[in-house]
Image (cartoon, rainbow, N blue to C red):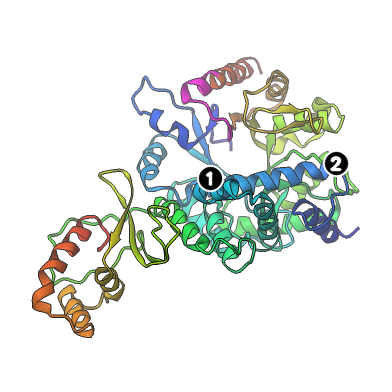
């Protein structure tokens, strides 16, 4: 008896790679499919609404089975939606939905931010002469659509910051201007914020004198929200 | 598990707001936690989870180690698991007699293993590997199965031999025994009697339902514990002195509602302790 062959054959049947040979195996096919679809649908409500509106159920099911067969690695259920997003990015199941990766990426950020460990630190007054870095608990991403308003008609850049606001007890999304977005990406934690800002503005041929005050206010606020730590 | 006394309950996020620490508030003797659900817990759960851990002992019950798999559990996950167990001072950890991944690809479901000597060897190796890594003796749970793979051993022979060979303890799920006994036509009490009961660490009870479409009992963990499972718990507790706990993973009621079931279990447990 070859146990590996038995297990492989069983897995292939419940994950839709091979035809089901027994009714009792179909129970597992249902259970596994349900476990995956339930998580994906709950993590990506907007995506699933589009699947329903555009009647893409067949494509959704096919993609789910292919994903189950090949790319579901994490033992953590909450990481499954992001694995599925990465899988879809490299596949052709939803060719017409050009905005799909942007949508899934955005929808997953909420789950990602929820699952981060709180960074506890003593309160210090904000100073440009100190060193700061961007928290790993936030998301900072350039999208090609107005993703927050779920508008996918026009392609244009949107710079979105997402973080957990402890006072509001919820994930907050903010559209940033391009310059602030680029600066947050630019920050080198080995340098003070002031040095970082000088280098950044010089690189973009922008006057430090004209812009420093505005940046300082924005950065202080981001520090109070633990975006900049 | 000789150090854990009384009855347990599965800790679910739905209960967190209703858990308080004054003397009047309900708390089970111990909570069972599923590490996969708590290792990366959302920020607003952590504070309460830590408070609960300070007041009530935890026992951990995993779902993704896939002990019957052709690949050993990944070190990265085992390290995260060990850190979690150490952080919350959890001595007792259990998993399932099943597999949930193949070639490291997850199925997120407990799948039936072929009941053979080769599988006993493979699972024993995996169990020992996990025990060495975690620095703990683990328990393994008899799982439900809706499909029987080709096998050379009976289920009870397989379990007893696996316990013997691996040195693991048995987490006896009496609801799983009942569900399997109906689906595969055997006598549940006889089955329990045939197990090496000295090795039982603790007991699970849960709810199930009959599925008309597949004409089988399904171990859903989504309903109240059924009469037959309670009866089987009574039967088992009259044979061994171990703690039982209730698992509820779906259609999760309020803590107040599940307390009624807990009280029922406590009565059965107390009766056994008094007259056993």
Q: Position of residue A225 (x, y in %)?
A: 24, 55
Q: Quadrant of residue B233?
A: top right
Quarter of the image with the C terminus of chain B in it: top right
Chain hosting mark 1: A
Residue linked to disc 1: A42
Lateral position of residue B74 relative to residue A19, left or right: left
Viewer-proximal residue, B225 or A222?
A222
Q: Alpha-carbon distance for marks 1 and 2?
A: 29 Å
Q: Is residue B184 above or below residue B134?
A: above
Quarter of the image with the N terminus of chain B in it: top right
Q: Position of residue A173 (x, y in %)?
A: 33, 54
The answer to which of marks 1 and 2 sits earlier in the sequence is 2
Q: Position of residue B169 (x, y in %)?
A: 67, 43
Q: Quadrant of residue A203?
A: bottom left
Q: Is residue B102 magenta?
A: no
| Element under disc 1 | helix
Q: Is residue B257 magenta?
A: yes
Residue drawn at x 56%, y 48% as measured from the top left: A48
Chain hosting mark 2: A
Viewer-proximal residue, A11 or B176?
A11
Q: Nearer the viewer, mark 1 or mark 2?
A: 1
Lateral position of residue B173 relative to residue B90, left or right: right
From this viewpoint, is residue B269 visible? yes
Q: Is residue A92 above or below residue A46?
A: below
Q: Which residues are magenta?
A: B248-260
Q: 10 Å neighbourhood of mark 1: few (<14), some, or many (≥20)?
A: few
What is the residue that sits farthest to the left in this orientation? A209
Residue linked to disc 2: A23
Asked whether the residues under marks 1 and 2 belong to the same chain, the reply is yes
From this viewpoint, is residue B62 visible? no
Q: Quadrant of residue A139?
A: bottom left
| Element under disc 2 | helix
């Amino acid at each position: 008896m070859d146990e590996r062959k038995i297990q492989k054959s069983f897995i292939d049947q419940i994950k839709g790679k091979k035809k089901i040979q027994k009714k009792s195996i179909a129970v597992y096919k249902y259970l596994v499919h349900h476990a995956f679809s339930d998580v994906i649908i709950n993590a990506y409500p907007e995506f699933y609404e589009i699947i329903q509106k555009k009647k893409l159920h067949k494509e959704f099911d096919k993609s789910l089975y292919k994903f189950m067969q090949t790319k579901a690695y994490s033992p953590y259920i909450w990481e499954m939606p992001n694995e599925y997003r990465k899988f879809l990015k490299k596949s052709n199941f939803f060719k017409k939905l050009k905005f799909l990766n942007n949508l899934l990426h955005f929808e997953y950020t909420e789950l990602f931010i929820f699952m981060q460990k709180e960074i506890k630190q003593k309160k210090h007054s904000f100073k440009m002469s100190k060193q700061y870095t961007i928290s790993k608990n936030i998301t900072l991403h350039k999208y090609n659509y107005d993703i927050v308003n779920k508008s996918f008609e026009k392609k244009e850049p949107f710079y979105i910051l997402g973080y957990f606001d402890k006072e509001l007890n919820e994930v907050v999304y903010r559209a940033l201007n391009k310059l602030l977005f680029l600066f947050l990406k630019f920050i080198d934690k080995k340098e003070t914020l002031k040095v970082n800002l000088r280098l950044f503005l010089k690189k973009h041929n922008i006057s430090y004198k004209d812009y420093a005050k505005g940046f300082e206010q924005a950065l202080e606020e981001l520090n109070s929200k633990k975006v900049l730590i | 598990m000789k150090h854990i006394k009384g009855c347990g309950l599965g800790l679910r996020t739905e209960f967190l707001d209703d858990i308080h620490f004054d003397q009047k508030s309900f708390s089970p003797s111990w909570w069972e936690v599923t590490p996969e659900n708590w290792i990366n817990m959302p920020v607003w759960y952590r504070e309460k989870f830590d408070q609960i851990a300070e007041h009530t002992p935890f026992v951990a019950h995993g779902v993704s180690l896939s002990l019957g798999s052709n690949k050993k559990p990944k070190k990265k996950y085992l390290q995260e698991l060990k850190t979690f167990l150490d952080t919350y001072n959890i001595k007792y950890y259990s998993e399932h007699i099943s597999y949930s991944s193949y070639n490291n690809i997850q199925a997120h479901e407990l799948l039936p293993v072929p009941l053979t000597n080769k599988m006993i060897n493979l699972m024993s190796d995996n169990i020992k590997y996990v025990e060495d890594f975690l620095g703990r003796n683990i328990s393994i749970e008899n799982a439900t199965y809706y499909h029987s793979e080709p096998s050379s051993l009976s289920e009870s022979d397989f379990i007893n031999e696996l316990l013997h060979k691996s040195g693991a303890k048995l987490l006896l799920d009496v609801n799983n025994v009942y569900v399997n006994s109906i689906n595969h036509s055997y006598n549940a009490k006889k089955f329990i009697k045939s197990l090496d009961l000295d090795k039982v660490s603790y007991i699970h009870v849960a709810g199930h339902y009959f599925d008309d479409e597949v004409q089988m009992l399904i171990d859903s963990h989504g309903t109240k514990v059924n009469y037959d499972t309670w009866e089987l718990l009574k039967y088992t507790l009259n044979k061994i002195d171990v703690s039982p706990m209730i698992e509820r993973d779906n259609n999760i009621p309020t803590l107040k509602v599940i307390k009624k079931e807990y009280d029922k279990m406590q009565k059965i447990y107390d009766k056994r302790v008094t007259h056993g």
